[in-house]
Image (cartoon, rainbow, N blue to C red):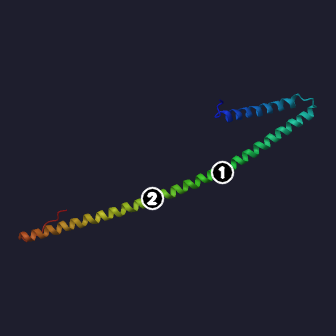
Amino acid sequence: MTDNKNCGHTFTNGLTYLLIGGGIGAGLALLFAPKSGTALRSDIADVTRKGYDATLEKATELRDQSAAAVTAVKEKAEAVYDFASAKISAGTEAINNAATSATGAVVDGIEKIQNEAEQVSKQIGNGRKSTNIV
């Protein structure tokens, strides 16, 4: 039985090596072909120009893809920042409301204790008003 898992991987490696070997062979064939110096230089210049143009085209594609990726990441980062900012603002407002409510409750409690102290003092009958507890 053969191992089918590595079959595609081996084929791809073999094809890659075949193409690399073909490129090297084509380059050597150009160098050793019985052509005049002018024709050989012209052929080399054509191959070089084609390679440069292909590289320039790929670089342009990569630049465009990178720009799109940067724009997408920037938009996502802004959305996350806006979301976090809104949550922090809501939390700050909730904390302020809770602090205001707690302060009001404490003040109400102090007033209630003072009123009860005054009533107790009056009930004892000494007629003096109680001093402030707080």
Above or below, 4 against 85 in this view is above
Which amino acid type is shown beneath numbered disc 2?
Answer: Lys
Residue at the extreme top: 32
- Residue 16 percent location from the top left of the image: 73, 34
Q: Report the residue at 25% width, 63% height from top.
A: 106
Left or right placement of residue 96 versus residue 50 in this view: left
Q: Seen from this angle, which residue lies furthest left?
A: 125
Where is the C terminus found, in terms of image quarters? Answer: bottom left
Name the residue: 86% across, 39% down.
46
Closer to the camera in the image, 83 or 23: 23
Classify 10 Å Cα crowding around label 2: few (below 14), some (14-19), many (20 and above): few
Q: Position of residue 63 (x, y in %)?
A: 69, 48
In this figure, which residue is indicated by the disc labeled 1?
A: 67
Amino acid marked by disc 1: Ala
Can you tell which quarter of the image residue 27 is in? top right
Residue 87, numbered circle: 2
CA separation in Å, label 2 and label 1? 30 Å
- Say what secondary structure mark 1 lies in: helix
Q: Position of residue 32 (x, y in %)?
A: 88, 28
